[in-house]
Image (tube, rainbow, N blue to C red):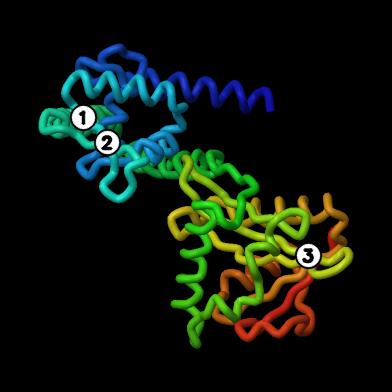
Amino acid sequence: MVTEVRRIRAFNRTVTRRLGVLNEKYLGRDRPYVESRLLFEIGTKGADVRALRGRLGMDSGFMSRLLRSLERKGLITIRPSPEDGRVRVVRLSRQGLAELRRIDALSDRLAQSMLASLTRVQTQRFMAAMSEVETLLRASSVEIAMADPASRDARHCLDRYFSEIDARFSSGFSRSQSGSEHADFIPPRGCMLVARLFGEPMGCGALRTLGTGLGEIKHMWISPEARGLGIGRRLLAELERVAKKHRVCAIRLDTNASLIEALRFYRSTGYREIGRYNDNPYAHHWFEKALK
Protein backbone atom coordinates (compact mmCIF):
# COMPACT_ATOMS: atom_id res chain seq x y z
CA MET A 1 0.00 0.00 0.00
CA VAL A 2 2.87 2.43 0.75
CA THR A 3 4.24 2.00 -2.78
CA GLU A 4 0.80 2.56 -4.31
CA VAL A 5 0.27 5.72 -2.28
CA ARG A 6 3.62 7.11 -3.40
CA ARG A 7 2.82 6.41 -7.04
CA ILE A 8 -0.57 8.09 -6.76
CA ARG A 9 0.98 11.17 -5.20
CA ALA A 10 3.61 11.32 -7.94
CA PHE A 11 0.87 10.95 -10.56
CA ASN A 12 -1.13 13.79 -8.97
CA ARG A 13 1.90 16.09 -9.01
CA THR A 14 2.56 15.39 -12.67
CA VAL A 15 -1.06 15.96 -13.68
CA THR A 16 -1.53 19.20 -11.72
CA ARG A 17 1.71 20.62 -13.09
CA ARG A 18 0.96 19.66 -16.72
CA LEU A 19 -2.56 21.08 -16.54
CA GLY A 20 -1.35 24.29 -14.94
CA VAL A 21 -3.90 24.19 -12.11
CA LEU A 22 -1.30 25.53 -9.66
CA ASN A 23 -0.98 28.81 -11.55
CA GLU A 24 -2.74 31.82 -10.05
CA LYS A 25 -3.98 32.75 -13.52
CA TYR A 26 -5.24 29.50 -15.01
CA LEU A 27 -5.04 29.38 -18.84
CA GLY A 28 -3.73 32.94 -18.70
CA ARG A 29 -7.07 34.31 -17.49
CA ASP A 30 -7.40 36.65 -14.52
CA ARG A 31 -8.58 33.97 -12.11
CA PRO A 32 -7.41 30.68 -10.52
CA TYR A 33 -8.48 27.26 -11.76
CA VAL A 34 -11.26 26.85 -9.20
CA GLU A 35 -13.15 29.92 -10.49
CA SER A 36 -12.80 28.82 -14.12
CA ARG A 37 -14.03 25.35 -13.18
CA LEU A 38 -17.04 26.87 -11.44
CA LEU A 39 -17.92 28.85 -14.57
CA PHE A 40 -17.69 25.62 -16.57
CA GLU A 41 -19.97 23.74 -14.13
CA ILE A 42 -22.57 26.53 -14.21
CA GLY A 43 -22.49 26.29 -18.00
CA THR A 44 -24.90 27.79 -20.48
CA LYS A 45 -27.99 26.41 -18.73
CA GLY A 46 -27.18 27.51 -15.17
CA ALA A 47 -27.31 25.36 -12.03
CA ASP A 48 -28.63 25.47 -8.49
CA VAL A 49 -26.12 26.09 -5.74
CA ARG A 50 -26.82 22.79 -3.98
CA ALA A 51 -26.08 20.80 -7.15
CA LEU A 52 -22.86 22.76 -7.70
CA ARG A 53 -21.65 22.03 -4.17
CA GLY A 54 -22.34 18.33 -4.65
CA ARG A 55 -20.62 18.07 -8.04
CA LEU A 56 -17.54 19.93 -6.89
CA GLY A 57 -17.41 18.58 -3.31
CA MET A 58 -17.23 22.09 -1.80
CA ASP A 59 -18.51 23.23 1.58
CA SER A 60 -21.11 25.98 1.59
CA GLY A 61 -18.75 28.67 2.95
CA PHE A 62 -16.12 28.21 0.25
CA MET A 63 -18.78 28.02 -2.45
CA SER A 64 -20.40 31.24 -1.22
CA ARG A 65 -17.08 33.09 -1.34
CA LEU A 66 -16.39 31.91 -4.89
CA LEU A 67 -19.86 32.88 -6.06
CA ARG A 68 -19.59 36.34 -4.49
CA SER A 69 -16.25 36.84 -6.25
CA LEU A 70 -17.69 35.89 -9.65
CA GLU A 71 -20.77 38.03 -9.01
CA ARG A 72 -18.64 41.08 -8.19
CA LYS A 73 -16.81 40.57 -11.48
CA GLY A 74 -20.11 40.61 -13.33
CA LEU A 75 -19.77 37.02 -14.58
CA ILE A 76 -22.82 35.47 -12.87
CA THR A 77 -26.24 36.30 -11.43
CA ILE A 78 -27.82 34.52 -8.47
CA ARG A 79 -31.61 34.44 -8.15
CA PRO A 80 -34.23 32.33 -6.32
CA SER A 81 -35.65 29.51 -8.43
CA PRO A 82 -39.11 30.32 -9.93
CA GLU A 83 -40.27 26.84 -8.87
CA ASP A 84 -38.90 26.95 -5.30
CA GLY A 85 -37.86 30.21 -3.66
CA ARG A 86 -35.64 28.31 -1.22
CA VAL A 87 -33.38 27.16 -4.07
CA ARG A 88 -30.78 29.60 -5.41
CA VAL A 89 -30.03 29.36 -9.11
CA VAL A 90 -26.76 30.61 -10.63
CA ARG A 91 -26.60 31.72 -14.26
CA LEU A 92 -23.83 33.16 -16.37
CA SER A 93 -24.24 36.78 -17.42
CA ARG A 94 -23.53 37.84 -21.00
CA GLN A 95 -19.99 38.61 -19.87
CA GLY A 96 -19.80 35.23 -18.15
CA LEU A 97 -20.93 33.39 -21.29
CA ALA A 98 -18.24 35.18 -23.31
CA GLU A 99 -15.64 34.21 -20.71
CA LEU A 100 -16.79 30.59 -20.81
CA ARG A 101 -16.28 30.52 -24.57
CA ARG A 102 -12.76 31.84 -24.13
CA ILE A 103 -12.01 29.25 -21.43
CA ASP A 104 -13.32 26.46 -23.65
CA ALA A 105 -11.12 27.58 -26.54
CA LEU A 106 -8.03 27.81 -24.31
CA SER A 107 -8.81 24.39 -22.77
CA ASP A 108 -9.00 22.88 -26.26
CA ARG A 109 -5.64 24.44 -27.06
CA LEU A 110 -4.12 22.99 -23.87
CA ALA A 111 -5.45 19.51 -24.74
CA GLN A 112 -4.04 19.80 -28.26
CA SER A 113 -0.65 20.76 -26.86
CA MET A 114 -0.57 17.52 -24.86
CA LEU A 115 -0.91 15.51 -28.04
CA ALA A 116 1.35 17.60 -30.27
CA SER A 117 4.62 15.87 -29.34
CA LEU A 118 3.21 12.33 -29.15
CA THR A 119 3.38 9.76 -31.91
CA ARG A 120 0.19 8.12 -33.17
CA VAL A 121 0.88 5.02 -31.08
CA GLN A 122 1.59 7.13 -28.00
CA THR A 123 -1.63 9.07 -28.57
CA GLN A 124 -3.62 5.82 -28.70
CA ARG A 125 -1.96 4.61 -25.50
CA PHE A 126 -2.63 7.98 -23.86
CA MET A 127 -6.33 7.90 -24.79
CA ALA A 128 -6.77 4.32 -23.57
CA ALA A 129 -4.91 4.97 -20.31
CA MET A 130 -6.83 8.18 -19.68
CA SER A 131 -10.16 6.41 -20.19
CA GLU A 132 -9.15 3.66 -17.76
CA VAL A 133 -7.92 6.14 -15.14
CA GLU A 134 -11.11 8.19 -15.42
CA THR A 135 -13.25 5.08 -14.88
CA LEU A 136 -11.24 4.04 -11.83
CA LEU A 137 -11.27 7.56 -10.39
CA ARG A 138 -15.04 7.65 -10.75
CA ALA A 139 -15.29 4.25 -9.06
CA SER A 140 -13.12 5.43 -6.17
CA SER A 141 -15.31 8.53 -5.78
CA VAL A 142 -18.54 6.62 -5.14
CA GLU A 143 -19.85 6.97 -1.58
CA ILE A 144 -22.46 4.66 -0.06
CA ALA A 145 -24.52 5.69 2.96
CA MET A 146 -27.75 4.94 4.78
CA ALA A 147 -30.74 6.98 3.63
CA ASP A 148 -34.34 7.54 4.63
CA PRO A 149 -36.51 5.86 1.96
CA ALA A 150 -38.56 9.08 1.83
CA SER A 151 -35.54 11.32 1.25
CA ARG A 152 -35.03 13.18 -2.01
CA ASP A 153 -32.12 11.02 -3.21
CA ALA A 154 -33.78 7.73 -2.26
CA ARG A 155 -37.00 8.71 -4.02
CA HIS A 156 -35.00 9.75 -7.09
CA CYS A 157 -33.38 6.30 -7.27
CA LEU A 158 -36.61 4.43 -6.58
CA ASP A 159 -38.53 6.42 -9.20
CA ARG A 160 -35.91 5.60 -11.83
CA TYR A 161 -35.78 1.96 -10.70
CA PHE A 162 -39.56 1.52 -11.00
CA SER A 163 -39.61 3.33 -14.33
CA GLU A 164 -36.88 1.06 -15.70
CA ILE A 165 -38.48 -2.21 -14.66
CA ASP A 166 -41.87 -1.01 -15.91
CA ALA A 167 -40.25 -0.60 -19.33
CA ARG A 168 -38.41 -3.93 -19.19
CA PHE A 169 -41.06 -6.25 -17.73
CA SER A 170 -43.20 -7.79 -20.47
CA SER A 171 -46.37 -7.05 -18.48
CA GLY A 172 -45.24 -3.68 -17.13
CA PHE A 173 -45.01 -2.95 -13.41
CA SER A 174 -47.35 -1.60 -10.75
CA ARG A 175 -45.91 -0.22 -7.51
CA SER A 176 -49.04 -1.23 -5.63
CA GLN A 177 -48.13 -4.89 -6.25
CA SER A 178 -44.46 -4.58 -5.33
CA GLY A 179 -45.11 -6.08 -1.89
CA SER A 180 -42.98 -3.63 0.10
CA GLU A 181 -43.47 -0.37 1.96
CA HIS A 182 -41.09 2.43 2.95
CA ALA A 183 -41.46 1.39 6.60
CA ASP A 184 -39.87 -1.97 5.76
CA PHE A 185 -36.57 -0.20 5.06
CA ILE A 186 -36.32 1.91 8.21
CA PRO A 187 -34.22 0.62 11.14
CA PRO A 188 -34.63 -1.64 12.99
CA ARG A 189 -36.87 -3.43 10.47
CA GLY A 190 -34.46 -2.83 7.61
CA CYS A 191 -32.39 -0.19 5.86
CA MET A 192 -31.91 1.61 2.57
CA LEU A 193 -28.56 2.51 1.05
CA VAL A 194 -27.92 5.18 -1.58
CA ALA A 195 -24.75 5.34 -3.68
CA ARG A 196 -23.65 8.83 -4.70
CA LEU A 197 -21.07 9.91 -7.27
CA PHE A 198 -19.87 13.47 -6.76
CA GLY A 199 -22.96 14.12 -4.68
CA GLU A 200 -25.44 12.79 -7.24
CA PRO A 201 -27.54 9.68 -6.42
CA MET A 202 -26.49 6.85 -8.74
CA GLY A 203 -27.82 3.69 -7.13
CA CYS A 204 -29.72 2.15 -4.28
CA GLY A 205 -30.42 -1.09 -2.49
CA ALA A 206 -32.62 -2.04 0.44
CA LEU A 207 -32.82 -4.71 3.11
CA ARG A 208 -35.85 -5.80 5.12
CA THR A 209 -36.50 -8.46 7.73
CA LEU A 210 -38.68 -11.43 6.78
CA GLY A 211 -38.41 -13.25 10.09
CA THR A 212 -35.99 -14.24 12.80
CA GLY A 213 -32.55 -14.51 11.23
CA LEU A 214 -33.93 -14.04 7.71
CA GLY A 215 -33.64 -10.94 5.53
CA GLU A 216 -34.51 -9.94 1.98
CA ILE A 217 -32.80 -7.70 -0.57
CA LYS A 218 -35.08 -5.32 -2.49
CA HIS A 219 -34.86 -2.51 -5.04
CA MET A 220 -31.28 -2.99 -6.21
CA TRP A 221 -30.68 -0.42 -8.95
CA ILE A 222 -27.68 1.30 -10.55
CA SER A 223 -27.99 4.27 -12.88
CA PRO A 224 -26.99 3.42 -16.48
CA GLU A 225 -24.51 6.33 -16.30
CA ALA A 226 -22.66 4.62 -13.44
CA ARG A 227 -22.75 0.98 -14.46
CA GLY A 228 -19.39 -0.72 -14.75
CA LEU A 229 -17.99 1.00 -11.66
CA GLY A 230 -18.61 -1.91 -9.29
CA ILE A 231 -21.36 -0.08 -7.40
CA GLY A 232 -23.70 -3.07 -7.39
CA ARG A 233 -21.20 -5.33 -5.68
CA ARG A 234 -20.38 -2.65 -3.13
CA LEU A 235 -24.05 -2.05 -2.35
CA LEU A 236 -24.73 -5.75 -1.99
CA ALA A 237 -21.69 -6.31 0.23
CA GLU A 238 -22.73 -3.43 2.49
CA LEU A 239 -26.29 -4.73 2.76
CA GLU A 240 -24.91 -8.13 3.72
CA ARG A 241 -22.64 -6.49 6.31
CA VAL A 242 -25.60 -4.66 7.84
CA ALA A 243 -27.62 -7.87 7.82
CA LYS A 244 -24.90 -9.79 9.68
CA LYS A 245 -24.62 -6.97 12.20
CA HIS A 246 -28.31 -7.47 12.96
CA ARG A 247 -27.89 -11.26 13.31
CA VAL A 248 -29.44 -12.15 9.97
CA CYS A 249 -28.20 -15.62 9.03
CA ALA A 250 -29.55 -15.82 5.49
CA ILE A 251 -30.68 -13.38 2.81
CA ARG A 252 -33.22 -14.02 0.11
CA LEU A 253 -34.26 -12.12 -3.00
CA ASP A 254 -36.35 -12.53 -6.10
CA THR A 255 -36.02 -11.20 -9.63
CA ASN A 256 -37.71 -11.14 -13.01
CA ALA A 257 -36.61 -13.36 -15.91
CA SER A 258 -36.14 -10.32 -18.15
CA LEU A 259 -33.37 -8.98 -15.89
CA ILE A 260 -30.60 -11.12 -17.33
CA GLU A 261 -27.86 -8.97 -15.84
CA ALA A 262 -29.37 -9.31 -12.36
CA LEU A 263 -29.56 -13.09 -12.64
CA ARG A 264 -25.91 -13.24 -13.68
CA PHE A 265 -24.91 -10.82 -10.93
CA TYR A 266 -26.59 -12.68 -8.06
CA ARG A 267 -25.26 -16.04 -9.18
CA SER A 268 -21.74 -14.61 -9.35
CA THR A 269 -21.98 -13.23 -5.80
CA GLY A 270 -22.85 -16.52 -4.12
CA TYR A 271 -26.64 -16.63 -4.27
CA ARG A 272 -28.13 -20.03 -5.05
CA GLU A 273 -31.51 -20.54 -6.68
CA ILE A 274 -34.29 -21.87 -4.44
CA GLY A 275 -38.01 -22.53 -4.75
CA ARG A 276 -40.65 -19.83 -4.61
CA TYR A 277 -40.88 -18.27 -1.14
CA ASN A 278 -43.32 -15.41 -1.81
CA ASP A 279 -46.29 -14.41 -3.96
CA ASN A 280 -44.59 -11.60 -5.91
CA PRO A 281 -46.40 -11.63 -9.29
CA TYR A 282 -43.33 -10.25 -11.06
CA ALA A 283 -40.84 -12.83 -9.79
CA HIS A 284 -39.62 -15.81 -11.84
CA HIS A 285 -36.46 -16.66 -9.89
CA TRP A 286 -35.80 -16.84 -6.15
CA PHE A 287 -32.39 -16.89 -4.49
CA GLU A 288 -30.84 -17.34 -1.05
CA LYS A 289 -27.40 -16.86 0.46
CA ALA A 290 -26.17 -18.01 3.87
CA LEU A 291 -24.21 -15.35 5.71
CA LYS A 292 -21.13 -16.62 7.50
Identified by mark 2, the residue type is Val
What residue appears at the point 41 percent right and 21 percent down from the top-left corner? 62
- Quadrant assignment, res 61: top left
x and y percentages locating residue 223 in the rendered image: 48, 58
Q: Residue 76: which disc? A: 1
Identified by mark 1, the residue type is Ile
Q: Residues within 10 Å of mark 3 (few under 14, many from 20)?
A: many
Callout 1–callout 2 Cβ contact below 8 Å = yes
Q: Residue furthest top?
A: 24
What residue appears at the point 87 percent right and 55 percent down from the top-left corner? 247
Q: Residues within 10 Å of mark 1 (few under 14, many from 20)?
A: many
Compute the Cα span from label 3 to label 1: 50 Å
- Quadrant assignment, res 58: top left
In the picture of the structure, the residue carrying the numbered disc 2 is 90
x and y percentages locating residue 252 in the rendered image: 76, 70
Q: Earlier in the sequence, mark 1 or mark 2?
A: 1
Q: Nearer the viewer, residue 19 or 169?
A: 169
Identified by mark 3, the residue type is Thr
What residue appears at the point 79 percent right and 79 percent down from the top-left corner? 274
In the picture of the structure, the residue carrying the numbered disc 3 is 209
Residue 105 visible in rendering: no
Secondary element under disc 2, as helix, strand or loop, is strand
Compute the Cα span from label 1 to label 2: 7 Å
x and y percentages locating residue 188 in the rendered image: 78, 55
Compute the Cα span from label 3 to label 2: 44 Å
Q: Earlier in the sequence, mark 3 or mark 2?
A: 2
Secondary element under disc 1, as helix, strand or loop, is strand
Residue 86 visible in rendering: yes
Q: Residue 208: which disc? A: none
Q: Is residue 26 above or below residue 151?
A: above
Q: Residues within 10 Å of mark 2 (few under 14, many from 20)?
A: many
